Image (cartoon, grey):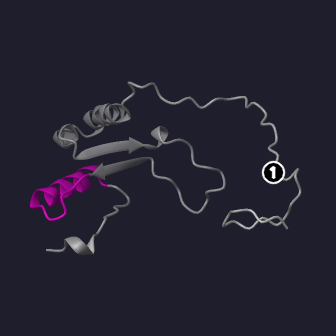
Amino acid sequence: MENLKSTFPIFTTNPFFFKTKAIKPSKFSIKPPPPDFDFRTEIMDDSRAKIAQTHPQLLDLANNGSLVLIEKSQYGPVPAWRTEFVEPEAIWLVGTTHISEESAVEVERVVQTVKPENVVVELCRSRQV
């Protein structure tokens, strides 16, 4: 066996093993977004518009960036192999400051207004009061 300077073990010295195969051109192309594309602004604008339409009483939270609504149609279809749970139609993301009374009130407002089937809370032991 040839001694190659690699930490990954090579188990063959066949010279054809290291040749690369030609890659067939694909029928689709994934282009990067244009340089001036700002996905955050687009998501926030879409979110504000939908919140204004469905729950205008929460628009102040959307305007200050505390509340973002992401709809299922924005993040694509669920793969067929994923059958163990159902994706939500919408995700209401509430940004908080962990020890802020104001954040707790905002979360309560959103939950009481939207009345979601599920609520997920991020807890962080290092930020206990």
Q: State yes or no: residue 53 in magenta.
A: no
Which SS type dominates the magenta stretch? helix
Dot 1, how many residues are within 10 Å of its Cα: few (below 14), some (14-19), or many (20+)?
Answer: few
Query: Which residue in the protein does label 1 denote?
Result: 18
Q: Nearer the viewer, residue 95 or 91?
A: 95
Image quadrant in which the N terminus is located: bottom right
The image quadrant of residue 10 is bottom right
Where is 50 relative to 67, above or below?
A: above
Residue at x-position 66% and y-position 67%? 7
Q: Which residues are magenta?
A: 95-115
| Residue 102 counted in the magenta span | yes
Horizontal relation, residue 113 to residue 8: left or right: left
**Could you tell me residue 27's position as x and y percent?**
72, 29
Residue at image x 45%, y 24%? 34
Q: Secondary structure at mark 1?
A: loop
Name the amino acid type tagged 1.
Phe
Q: Nearer the viewer, residue 115 or 97?
A: 97
Q: Please report the residue visible at 34 percent of the width from the left and 55 percent of the height from the top.
A: 116
Measuring 14% from the left and 65% from the top, which residue is drawn there? Answer: 99
Picture layout, residue 21 above or below residue 86: above
Residue in front for this viewpoint, 17 or 77: 17
Answer with the quarter of the image where residue 56 lies. Answer: top left
